[in-house]
């Protein structure tokens, strides 16, 4: 089956690191994604990682992938108030028809306080 | 256009009415997806278009839901005889290519929030 699970809420102090965790079920997922949703806005792609990689770093963002445990995490260094948003993890379901679709988790609400 | 445009942004309707939600994807984008997002949940896949061909409609909840993309550009999601349980944010996304083995970079619109009274 297809299921992506995330913890629902995370609260951090400004300047600390945030770690948002996700587990997925489809071992054939080729890419895994992190999207950010701010109030009144669409989902914005933050970063993605190919399934044969263990880690990807992009400025303040670090993605770690444990393919064996089907566990994905997003670390935000030096978290700022502007990082307050809902973060969605997504896995890829690939179909023989030559297309794929993203399956999203329920999202983790990150609250950053002074 | 510069981004994915959806209209209306907000729609309030009475139970039993039909609604049509429009998506204008980024110009030249081949793939178009519709997702539904209930409050406190992640986006749930509804349907996928490759140009004008509806390649996957497995996520449409029932036969009251339909979608079309007749010229391979603008798409319309139609819900007939709306029910209160249809209330949600409906999101459209597009991507440049048909995603096969590469990363599927979706650009989402701001969504259409539907409220059925």
Image (cartoon, coloured by chain):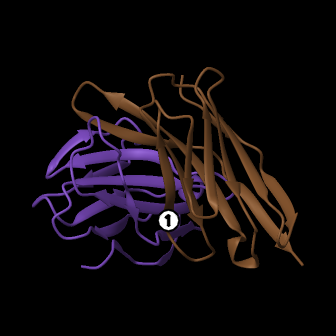
Q: Is residue B16 visible?
A: no
- Residue B71: image x %, image y %? 9, 61
**Chain ID, mark 1:** A
Residue receiving disc 1:
A44
- Residue A81: image x %, image y %? 76, 77
Q: How many marks?
A: 1
In the image: residue A111, left or right of residue B66: right
Q: Which chain is purple?
A: B
In the image: residue B16, left or right of residue A74: left
Q: Residue at x 38, y 40 (%)?
A: A101
Dot 1: within a 10 Å radius of its alpha carbon, few (fewer than 14), some, or many (20 or more) residues?
A: some
Instruction: Point out the image quarter for the C terminus of chain B.
Output: bottom right
Q: Residue at x 44, y 45 (%)?
A: B45
> In this rendering, is residue B115 above or below A24?
below
- Foreground residue, A12 or A101? A12
> In this rendering, is residue B18 above or below A104?
below
Instruction: Point out the image quarter for the N terminus of chain B.
Output: bottom left
- Residue B88: image x %, image y %? 56, 60
In the image: residue B83, left or right of residue B35: right
Give the quarter of the image for residue A95: top left
Q: Residue at x 15, y 65 (%)?
A: B28
Residue at the left extreme, as displayed: B71
Give the quarter of the image for residue B38: bottom right
In the image: residue B83, left or right of residue B3: right
Q: Is residue A83 visible?
A: yes
Q: Residue at x 31, y 50 (%)?
A: B66
As helix, strand or loop, the secondary structure at mark 1 comes to strand
- Residue B43: image x %, image y %? 53, 51
Q: Chain A shown in which color?
A: brown
């Amino acid at each position: 089956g297809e299921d992506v699970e995330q913890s629902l809420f995370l609260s951090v102090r400004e300047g600390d690191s945030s770690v948002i965790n996700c587990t997925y079920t489809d071992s054939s997922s080729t890419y895994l994604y992190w999207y950010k949703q701010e109030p009144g806005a669409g989902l914005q792609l933050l970063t993605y990682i190919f399934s044969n990689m263990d880690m990807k770093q992009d400025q303040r963002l670090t993605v770690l992938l444990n393919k064996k445990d089907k566990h994905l995490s997003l670390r935000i260094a030096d978290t700022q108030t502007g990082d307050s948003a809902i973060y969605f993890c997504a896995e890829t379901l690939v179909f023989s028809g030559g297309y794929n679709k993203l399956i999203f988790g329920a999202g983790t609400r990150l609250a950053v306080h002074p | 256009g510069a981004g994915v445009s959806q209209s209306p942004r907000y729609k309030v309707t009475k139970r039993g009415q039909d609604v049509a939600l429009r998506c204008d994807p980024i110009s030249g984008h081949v793939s178009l997806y519709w997702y539904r997002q209930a409050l406190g949940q992640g986006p749930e896949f509804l349907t996928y278009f490759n140009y004008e061909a509806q390649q996957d409609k497995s996520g449409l909840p029932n036969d009251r839901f339909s979608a079309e993309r007749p010229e391979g550009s603008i798409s319309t999601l139609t819900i007939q005889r709306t029910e209160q349980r249809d209330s949600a944010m409906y999101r459209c996304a597009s991507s440049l290519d048909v995603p096969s083995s590469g990363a599927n970079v979706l650009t989402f619109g701001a969504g259409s929030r539907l409220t059925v009274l």
